[in-house]
């Protein structure tokens, strides 16, 4: 693989990998840059790469934990199904594009090909039907082919702990060239400290902006074009209120038909409707305890029973 160099062994400590991660663009970043990742936006990735936001700590995530534990088993099953031996490879850096990184799961012995390993739950099975591959994973494999010069990439997935599938992705230079172009432009934004535009509508971006700008600044006068944004906001808010009212009306009609029943079935399309009676909940007002019994409040706090969240900002247009 003369198109790239090994910069971290597969058994390198996690701390070293974390240090390398922000020196370039990795395979899992490719789908984010293309707008294919529903959990992370390009602005969030940019904020992480420029040091404005810390990447989410997934070390305690159960899905990530079990995915890591099952990776060798999925690699072994791939060999059993295909007869293709694989080996661990480590983290690679592209020579032509030094900002392109590849943390390769496995390299296929005797072929110019790699293997990406995934685990997912049964609810995601449809995304892997037939020749289907989630778009963000396709972009990830293209990225690895761009870095390594591989002719193809295999992807193996274990669904719901018992449904194993594997696919082969052939190299398409046109797609790879387009990906490199998009990633190159993104990396220029990182190096020039320029936020990607336009600002998107994702929850990921909203959380990132709140972390980047903690508040406390002086009042500002917005530019003229902000009036158009506010007008759009007002129009969409009015439509949302209309939709919310209409939706509640449908709910009320159905509740009127169900009366005391907690479950109903629509005869036309078999849709199931539930109107469950919940158990009474006990609540404690920490605000009242703090006012009326400060000593008890401090005792609860000292015992670790009072959790104090990070300060957050609330956005409103008056």
Image (tube, rainbow, N blue to C red):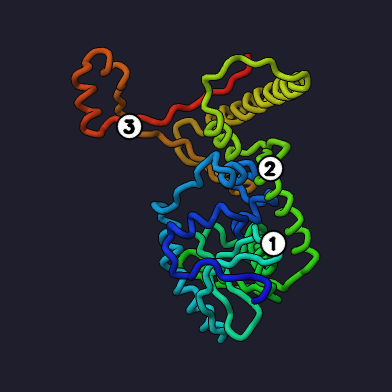
Residue under numbered circle 1: 97
The residue at the point 58 percent across, 54 percent down is 23
As measured in the structure, the alpha-carbon distance from the residue carrying label 3 to the one carrying label 2 is: 39 Å
As measured in the structure, the alpha-carbon distance from the residue carrying label 3 to the one carrying label 1 is: 46 Å
Q: Is residue 135 above or below residue 298?
A: below
Measured as percent of width and height from the top left, residue 138 is found at 67, 63
Q: Is residue 157 visible?
A: no
The residue at the point 65 percent across, 56 percent down is 30
Q: In front: mark 3 or mark 2? A: 2
Q: Earlier in the sequence, mark 3 or mark 1?
A: 1
The quarter of the picture where residue 225 lies is top right
Q: Earlier in the sequence, mark 3 or mark 2?
A: 2
Quadrant (top left, top right, bottom left, bottom right) of the N terminus: bottom right
**Secondary-structure class at tag 1:** loop
As measured in the structure, the alpha-carbon distance from the residue carrying label 1 to the one carrying label 2 is: 17 Å
Local crowd at mark 2 within 10 Å, few (<14), some, or many (≥20)?
few
In the image, 311 versus 50, the foreground residue is: 50
Q: Earlier in the sequence, mark 1 or mark 2?
A: 1
Measured as percent of width and height from the top left, residue 288 is found at 29, 16
The residue at the point 19 percent across, 19 percent down is 295
The quarter of the picture where residue 297 lies is top left
Measured as percent of width and height from the top left, residue 178 is found at 78, 58
Local crowd at mark 3 within 10 Å, few (<14), some, or many (≥20)?
few
Q: Is residue 21 above or below residue 296?
A: below
Residue 307: image tag = 3
**Secondary-structure class at tag 2:** loop
């Amino acid at each position: 693989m003369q198109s790239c160099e090994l910069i971290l062994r597969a058994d390198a400590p996690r701390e070293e990998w974390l240090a390398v991660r922000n020196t370039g663009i990795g395979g899992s970043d490719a789908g984010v840059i293309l707008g294919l990742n529903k959990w992370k936006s390009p602005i969030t990735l940019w904020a992480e790469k420029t040091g404005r936001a810390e990447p989410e700590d997934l070390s305690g995530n159960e899905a990530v934990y079990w995915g890591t534990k099952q990776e060798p088993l999925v690699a072994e099953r791939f060999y059993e199904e295909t007869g293709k031996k694989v080996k661990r490879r480590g983290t690679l850096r592209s020579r032509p594009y030094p900002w392109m990184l590849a943390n390769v799961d496995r390299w296929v012995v005797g072929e110019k090909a790699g293997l990406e390993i995934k685990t997912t739950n049964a609810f995601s099975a449809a995304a892997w039907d037939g020749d289907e591959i989630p778009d963000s994973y396709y972009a990830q494999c293209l990225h690895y082919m761009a870095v390594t010069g591989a002719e193809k990439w295999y992807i193996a997935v274990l669904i719901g702990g018992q449904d194993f599938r594997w696919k082969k992705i052939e190299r398409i230079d046109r797609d790879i060239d387009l990906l490199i172009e998009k990633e190159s432009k993104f990396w220029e934004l990182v190096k020039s400290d320029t936020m990607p535009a336009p600002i998107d509508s994702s929850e990921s971006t909203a959380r990132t902006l709140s972390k980047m700008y903690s508040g406390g600044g002086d009042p500002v006068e917005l530019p003229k074009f902000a009036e158009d944004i506010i007008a759009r906001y007002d129009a969409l808010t009015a439509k949302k209120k209309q939709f919310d009212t209409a939706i509640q009306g449908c709910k009320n009609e159905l509740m009127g038909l169900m009366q005391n029943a907690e479950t109903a079935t629509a005869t036309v399309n078999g849709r199931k409707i539930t109107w469950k009676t919940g158990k009474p909940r006990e609540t404690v007002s920490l605000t009242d305890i703090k006012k009326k019994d400060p000593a008890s409040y401090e005792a609860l706090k000292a015992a670790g029973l009072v959790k104090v969240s990070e300060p957050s900002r609330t956005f409103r247009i008056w």
